[in-house]
Image: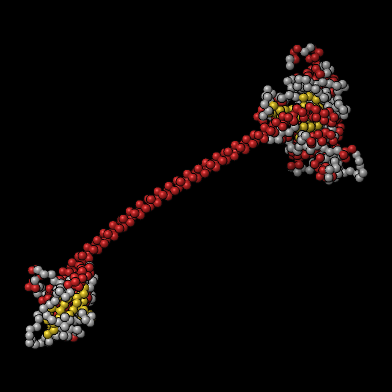
Amino acid sequence: MDNDALSPSQQEALSQLQALTNGGDADVARSVLESVDWDVQRAANIVFESAPTAPLSIPSIPGASIPGATYTSTHTEAFEIDDSEQDGLLSGRPSGREFPRISPSSSILSLLLRPLRLIIALLAVPYTILRVVLRTLHIPLPLPPVPLSFSITGLGLNFGLSPRPSLGPAPVRDAKTASERWIRALEEETGCVSISRAQMAGGGEASGVASSSAPGLSRRAGDESPSSSRVLPEFFIGSYESFVKACAKETEPKIGCAVLVSDEHDDVAEFKRSTLTDPGFVRLLQENDILIWGGDIRDRDAWGAAQKLQATTYPFVAFVALQPRRGSSAIAQNKSILTILSRHQGPSIPTSSGPTSPSTLTTHIADHLLPRVTPVLAQLRSSATERDAALAVATRARERERALRAEQDRAFAESARRDKERIERKMQEEREGKEEERRRSMEEERAKEEQRKREEQRKVWEEKRMAWRRWGRRAFVPREPRPSEQGRGRTVRIGVRMPDGRRAVRFFGQMDSLTAVYAFVDTLFIPEGNAFSSDLDPLTAPDGASSSADESGLMHAISTMTEGRTEEWWGFKLVTTYPRKEVQWEPERKVGEVEGLKSGGQLVVELVDGEYGSVKGKERERRSLESRVVSAKGSESDEYETESD
C-alpha cells in the first residue's frame, strides 16, 4: 500500500497505532484502521484483543477473498486457493504480517516501567555472579537469591530472543509433549475427555470427570453438571507440522481444524466450555472425520502455527484442506495444495452469532465447508486409489518382467553351464583318448620290445640248443649195434613218430642209455642241408662243457640253461603208443630198464612249450602235422615189422 497518499490525519492515526503496538506491520495497521473508519481507540481495542463495541467487517488479505462469498460473522474469513498462504502454512517461517501480543491492561504500565526494570535487571546480574562465586569457593556469606520478578527472565526482558510472552508456564520444546499437556489442561478445565476415552471409561457415557479418565479430577456422586453429558473432540497429538501433513496425506486427505487459544484472553475460557464441548459440534467433527488440533500460543509450536495462520485475536479457529492450485481445473494430487479454507476468531458469545460459537462453526461446516471440500477430497481419494492401482499394476508388470528376465538369465546360465560341461567333457574325452593312445602306443612299444627281446633270447636259445643237438648227435647217439655184438645187450627196435608225421626207426642195445634215445629224437629236429651235415658237427661241447660222452656236461647244461627243467630243455616228451605211457628222461638210465622199451617199441613225440619258446608257437603246426599223420596213417610204414604193427 502507498502510505504517502493518506491524509495527514490518517497518517497520524497510523503512527499512533504503530506506537501503541511497538511498531507492528504498517499494512495490517492500515487495514485495521480502514475497517473502523480510522478510529484509533477502536483499532487499539481490536489489536489488544478486546471485544469491539460494534460489529466490524475485517477484510481478508488482498487476493484471498472469494468473490460473492457469504460471511457467517464479522470475523469469519474464507480463502480461495492461495500459494502464498500455503508457503506460510508449511514453510515454517513467519509471514511478517502480525502484531506483537500485548495485554491491554499492562501495555501502558509496561512502557513506563521498562527503563526501571531494565536497570534493576542489570544490577541483578553482578549480584548473581558474586553469589555463584561465593558458593563455589565455599565462603560462608549468606546471600539471598535474586527474586524471579527482578531477574531478566522474570521481568520479561528477553531482548527479542523469544517471541513468547514472559508469563505462563515454561515453554516445552517437544511439540508432542506440549500438545499432550495442553489437552490434559483442557480436560481439567472443562471436566470432559475425548470421545474415545469417554467410551472406554463409561461404556458410551460422555462423562469425563471421573478419576479414571481425567487424572487429578474428581466428581461427587450425584453431580449432574452440564459437563457430565459433554465430551471433547478427538484432538490430534503431535506438532502442527505433523497435523498439516496428516491432513494432506496422499491416500487419505482430510479436513483439518486448527484451534489456537491464549489464556490471557477473557474469551478463551468460555470458548473452551461452550464450543469445544458442544455435542453437535463434536459430533459433526467426528462424523465427517475432521482432524482437529489445538494449542496455546505460549508454546513454541502453537506460536509458530499462529504466525502461519495469521491469527490476530483469540480464540482462533481455522479450517484447512487440499484444494486445486489456482488456475488448475484438474484435481490431481500433483496439482493440489493445502489451503486455508476459512478463519474464525473472536468470542464465542453470543451463542447464535459469535465468530467462534458452536452454532456459527456448525453452520459454516455444514453449509459451506463440506459442500465445497467433500467432492474435492473424494476425487483426490479416487485419484490416489487409481494411482495406487496403476502403480500396483506397474509394479506387478515390473515384477513379472524381472521374473522373466531372471528366468531367462537362469536358462542362459543353465545353457552356458551345459555347454561348458559338454566342452569340458569333450576335452576330457580327448585327453583320455590321447592318454589311452599314448598308453597303447607305449604298451605296443613295450610289447614289441619284449617280443624283440624274446626273439633275441629265442634266437640265442635256438643257436645254443642247435649246437647241443649237433653235439649230442656226435656224442650221445651211438651207432646201431651189429649182429653178435657183445657188451650192449640184446638189440631192440624203436620206432619214432614225429609231430610232422615223419617216422624214424633205429636199433639200440638194452644197455644203451636212455639219453641216446632222447638224443636220437632230438637230432630229428636238425634241418637237412649241407650246413647241418653230421660231418660238421662240433667236436667239443658248447659253452665249455665237458667234451666227454658222459652225461655230466649235459646235466650241467640243463641245470644252467633251464634250471633243471628237462622237458623244457628237450622241448618234447616221448610217449608209448599202447598202453600210453610217458617215458621220462633220467640220466644214466638204461633202455632195458624202461618199461615198454625192453623188447623195443613205438614212441610218439609230443612237443612241449618252453620258457624260451624253443617249440613255442608251433602248436598249430603240430596239430596240422598230426592231422596230416592221421590222414596218411596206414599209407606210410617202415621197412621193419614191429610188435605195434
Instruction: Pick whichever, 629 or 290, lies toward us.
Output: 629
Would residue 333 appear left or right of 597 to someone viewing this image? Answer: right
Q: Residue at x 10, y 76 (%)?
A: 474
Residue at left offset 91%, top offset 44%? 220
Instruction: Identify the residue at the far right of this view.
Output: 222
Q: Residue 29: x and y, percent?
A: 78, 20
Q: Nearer the viewer, residue 469 or 152?
A: 469
* Tally of numbered tags: 0
Residue 116: quarter of image: top right
Q: Quadrant of the C terminus?
A: bottom left
641 is higher (above) or lower (below) than 326:
below
**Snapshot quadrant of residue 342:** top right
Give whichever of 249, 182 is nearer the camera.
249
Residue 307 in the image, given as x and y percentages of width and height: 75, 28
Q: Tell me the quadrant of the picture where the N terminus can be found.
A: top right
Expressed as whole percent of the image width and height from the top left, the position of residue 419 reads 43, 47
In this image, 517 relative to 238: left or right? left
Residue at 70% of width from left, 31% of height from top? 379
User: How are the colours assigned in the image?
Assistant: secondary structure
From where the camera sits, is residue 29 visible?
Answer: no
Asked if one can make out residue 564 in the rendered structure from this viewpoint, the answer is yes
Residue at left 77%, top 28%? 371
The answer to which quarter of the image holds residue 470 is bottom left
Residue 60 is situated, as x and y percent measured from the top left of the image, at 77, 22
